[in-house]
Amino acid sequence: MEGGPCPGKSNQDNKIKSRNPIRQAHLNLCARLWGMKGDNMIRIFKTIDGKIHQVEEATEGCWIALTDPTATEIFEVSNKYQIEVDDLRAPLDEEERSRIEVEDNYTLILVDTPIIEERGDKDWYGTIPLSIIVTNEMIITVCLEDTSVLGKFMDGRVRNFYTYMKTRFILQILYNNASMFLHYLRIIDKKSEEVEEKLHASTRNQELIELLELEKSLVYFTTSLRSNEVVLEKLLKVERIKQYPDDTDLLEDVIVENKQAIEMANIYSGILSGMMDAFASVISNNLNIVMKFLATVTIVLSIPTMIASFYGMNVNSHGMPFADSPYGFAIVLGLTLLLSLFVAYIFNKKDLF
């Protein structure tokens, strides 16, 4: 194929910077060859008459939301708005780090956002990257899946939200992101309390595994929140993002909310780690109690078994006690029962039952 290699993920020379028709056609062909089939996940929103509306065409002051975009969609957006392909693909990598990058035509803000993952018919918590690309005309967000953070804006459930007020929009996304971390942290704390109640009488590993999953979620949250904190600190120094007096309080709220989430994550993580160590010992102790009970029951039941085995031996019956008595069976059964009860009473006094 002429015109050079198709743009790849790692080839920095293939970034889209030209409007050359031949180059454009070549990129479109590569997108078709490279693209994945699926539903169009490019949605455009704009504030009209104070309310959020989904529109068909992107105009100045709108918000373009990309959710798990295909390669074709990425190339379309890249060609149209002169954004590098690598920057559009960055949030599609779950391991991508949070950062701010200032380019000639736009600013990239990449943060981690919390999500719910369903595994084994249960909800667990993790994080995925969310990018906010700020151009002179609009804001573009890219994420692997629909998140609760952006869902509030799409549904119009955020007060004083206007797509054309880009700085406030960015801060509102970051504020709601930190608030969502706090919300999920409280849910994790409640779940750990529910598991704790089960652990008091548990001899299984299931509860410990649940605590381990919760601790893993807290590790993800703590790491992501600290990375987001660095992004917020850098955001204050980015001249491209205009700071308006009306948004000063909102920016302070974002920073405070994020710090509170970090502190809560650290506290819950410490509590959960200590709880796991303590309840590992509790489960082991509960298992020892069960084994002790079974051993005691085995000893008590061995008494009638042993006596019955004596009378079952193939020997002359004249030598066996009560063998000639018509009430011999009842007498032996009664003595066996009394002896077993006596041994059980002794074990009970020693708290072995």
Image (cartoon, rainbow, N blue to C red):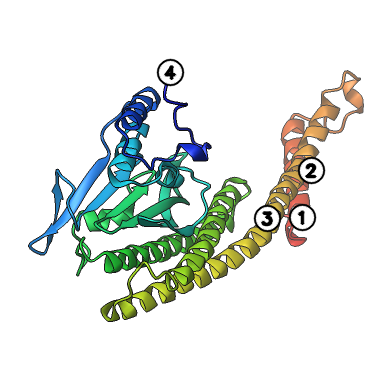
Which is nearer the N-term, disc 3 or disc 2? Answer: 3
**Is residue 336 visible from the viewing direction of this image?**
yes
Element assignment for label 1: helix
Left or right: residue 140 compared with residue 312: left
In three-dimensional space, the C-alpha distance between marks 3 and 2, rounded to whole angstroms, equals: 29 Å
Which is nearer the N-term, disc 4 or disc 3? Answer: 4
In three-dimensional space, the C-alpha distance between marks 4 and 3, rounded to whole angstroms, equals: 62 Å
Residue farthest to the left?
A: 49
Q: Name the residue under label 3.
A: 280
**Residue depth check, mark 3 versus mark 2: number of the one nearer the observer:** 3
The answer to which quarter of the image holds residue 132 is: bottom left
Which of the numbered marks, if any, corresponds to residue 347?
A: 1
The answer to which quarter of the image holds residue 183 is: bottom left
Q: Are marks 2 and 1 in contact (CB under 8 Å)?
A: yes
Q: Mark 2 points at which residue?
A: 299
Amino acid under label 4?
Answer: Met
In three-dimensional space, the C-alpha distance between marks 1 and 3, rounded to whole angstroms, equals: 28 Å
Q: Please state which of residues 197 and 263 is positioned toward the viewer in this rendering.
A: 263
Residue beneath the point at 36% across and 75% down: 251
**Residue depth check, mark 1 versus mark 4: number of the one nearer the observer:** 4
Percent coordinates x, y for residue 351 in the rendering: 73, 60
Percent coordinates x, y for residue 85 in the rendering: 41, 41
Residue beneath the point at 53% across and 47% down: 95
Q: Please state which of residues 324 and 199 is positioned toward the viewer in this rendering.
A: 199
Residue 298 versus residue 281 in the image, above or below? above
